Image (cartoon, rainbow, N blue to C red):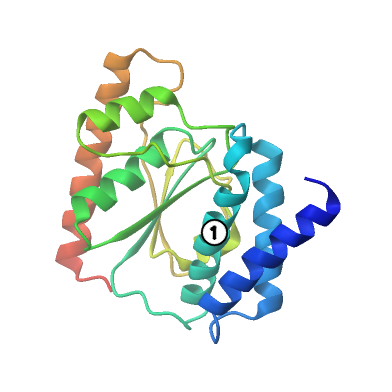
């Protein structure tokens, strides 16, 4: 898109989201996060045809997280953030499993320190085998809003690169990176994450975390 087209797109998205988040986030903040989300995805994503749609989805997620972190929007269930380097495999699978297995008892997001251009196709395939559709997902950047809104941050192979927020629980899961591995190994990684997620859900439920 050229500069004029960019501004027209940003104006349309900002208007929609400013209306949706009226009273929760200022219009100026909405526009800033819309533009920043678009630029971040434009720098990394290979899925150019859906860039505007993905940018609006990412901006919506960030605005929701910001409103939650600042106490303007309630969080009736625990917020869990899964973080890995590329957000193309492990963290995406873990978040999808948490949403599927949690059945509304938790809300999960995922993000990457250095987001990949697209999801690993093997991930989409092995998750589809267990009835979890990830065909519409895409790698997303880690942002301060997502971290601040989380009750639990779970890292998967990104070391100490994740920002630390006081009063937030951090866990690290030593799970292999599925990138480039044969499907049999990717399935084993999926099943390991499924067990870890199940244990996490049990813990969060027993603790009665908000």
Q: Can you say which quadrant of the picture contains the C terminus? A: bottom left
Q: Of residues 51 and 154, which is closer to you in this image?
A: 51
Q: Is residue 136 left or right of residue 85?
A: left
Residue at the image position 49 percent from the left and 69 percent from the top = 64
Q: Quadrant of residue 86?
A: top right
10 Å neighbourhood of mark 1: few (<14), some, or many (≥20)? some
Kindly identify which residue carries mark 1.
Answer: 164
Q: Is residue 209 left or right of residue 7?
A: left
Residue at the image position 78 percent from the left and 60 percent from the top = 7
Residue at the image position 42 percent from the left and 24 percent from the top = 121
Q: Can you say which quadrant of the picture contains the N terminus? A: top right
Residue 114 spot, x, y in % from top left: 61, 38
Q: Could one spot residue 151 in this view of the protein? A: yes
Question: Which residue extends farthest top?
Answer: 182
Q: Quadrant of residue 184?
A: top left
Residue at the image position 67 percent from the left and 51 percent from the top = 38
Quick check: 176 above or below 33?
A: above
Q: Is residue 128 left or right of residue 152?
A: left
Q: Could one spot residue 178 in this view of the protein? A: no
Residue 63 spot, x, y in % from top left: 55, 68
Question: Which residue extends farthest bottom?
Answer: 23
Residue 39 spot, x, y in % from top left: 72, 49
């Amino acid at each position: 898109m050229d500069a004029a087209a960019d501004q027209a797109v940003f104006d349309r998205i900002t208007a929609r989201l400013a209306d949706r988040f009226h009273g929760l986030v200022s219009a100026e903040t909405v526009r800033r996060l819309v533009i920043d989300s678009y630029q971040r995805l434009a720098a990394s994503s290979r899925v150019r045809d859906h860039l505007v749609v993905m940018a609006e989805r990412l901006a919506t997620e960030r605005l929701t997280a910001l409103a939650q972190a600042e106490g303007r929007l309630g969080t009736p269930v625990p917020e869990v953030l899964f973080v890995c380097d590329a957000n193309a495999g492990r963290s995406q699978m873990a978040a999808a499993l948490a949403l599927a297995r949690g059945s509304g008892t938790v809300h999960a997001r995922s993000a990457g320190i250095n987001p990949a251009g697209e999801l690993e196709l093997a991930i989409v395939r092995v998750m589809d085998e267990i009835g979890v559709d990830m065909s519409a997902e895409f790698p997303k950047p880690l942002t301060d809003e997502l971290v601040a809104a989380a009750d639990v941050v779970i890292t998967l192979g990104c070391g100490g690169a994740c920002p630390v927020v006081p009063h937030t629980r951090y866990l690290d899961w030593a799970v292999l990176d599925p990138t480039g591995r044969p499907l049999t190994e990717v399935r084993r990684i999926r099943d390991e994450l499924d067990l870890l997620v199940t244990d996490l859900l049990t813990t969060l439920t027993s603790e009665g975390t908000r």
